[in-house]
Image: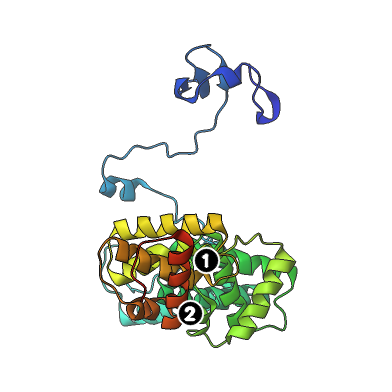
Amino acid sequence: MVSEGGSQGPLEEKCPPDKVVFDESRGQYVCLETGEVIEERVIDQGPEWRAFTSDEESKRARAGSPLSPMIHDGGLTSVIDWRDKDATGKKLEMKKRLDAMRWRKWQLRTRIQSSIDRNITQAAVELERIADQLGLPKSIKEEAVSIYRRAIERGIVRGRSVEAVAAAALYIACRIHKIPRQLDEISSITKADKREISRCYRMLVKELEVKVPPTDSADYVPRIVSALGLSGRVAKKAVELLEEARKLGITAGKDPTGVAAAAVYAAAQMLGIRRTQKDIAAVVGVTEVTVRNRYRELVRSLKLQLPEE
């Protein structure tokens, strides 16, 4: 029994996932317990060939690289290689190398025709540069380019700096994926200043209706612990302290980076690991006074048996 529109019928709900198998010969998903056909005429989107080694896979594959939002056309067009070698790996003659150079130039011109394509290409290069300097993963870059693409399709980028909008999109992507980066960090490696990036950030959130989760102090803990060379026990203890502090409401309205720094310092103290407030403040980018004040609030509110500094 196959339900219309992909919705599950009453019998399908009784089939546990571990009892549903795929019948390759018929292209059907079948429940082993009830014998019910969950789905039929399933299209196999995998290759029709088999490969047992990575070398065999690379030789038998005929498709190109997957689509990427980092490229303005998604990566659908072909690219003329810059290595100037033929199919056998031999170096091309000088005349053919000059021809290939001319082909690459004209291909680049024909790929990027509209102003939107040029804008997205420029923004993608800027986002790649900023993300690499901040050590951000590929998922953040792709999310930021997708946000920028939506913005330019809505026509809200016109009249604004490409660097500022790109930096704001990257900041939103970091917030969405809970990889904390501060505006000060991003603005320090871009031409746009912090105020301009902040305005673009508010504009993108409002116009694109992006749901940005609030910054959690616990998100900063792994980064602080890693920068200080501390163990996972310190990170776990710091997150536990932050959870208790959040329940008491003492983290509300406080700078999350300062609270996270104080929690890491308190956790290190509790586990007998020596780190100074100055060291932690330098890593986080806040003042030593901020770490000290947040630390004292944690000790007083959570009634921790720790020496006052």
Q: Give coordinates of residue 235: x percent, y percent.
A: 35, 59
Q: Alpha carbon of mark 1 to alpha carbon of mark 2: how far?
A: 12 Å
Residue ID for mark 1: 174
Residue drawn at the location 52% of the way across and 23% of the way down: 29
Residue ID for mark 2: 185
Q: Give coordinates of residue 171: x percent, y percent.
A: 55, 71
Q: Are marks 1 and 2 in contact (CB under 8 Å)?
A: no
* Quadrant of the snapshot with the N terminus: top right
Scheme by which the image is coloured: rainbow
Report crowding for label 1: few under 14, some 14 to 19, many 20 or more residues within 10 A (C-alpha). Answer: many
What amino acid type should be assigned to the residue bearing mark 2? Glu
* Quadrant of the snapshot with the C terminus: bottom left
Residue drawn at the location 56% of the way across and 78% of the way down: 122
| Viewer-side residue, 278 vs 143 | 278
Q: Is residue 279 left or right of residue 183?
A: left
Q: Give coordinates of residue 148: x percent, y percent.
A: 62, 69
Mark 2 element type = helix
Q: Is residue 276 left or right of residue 41?
A: left
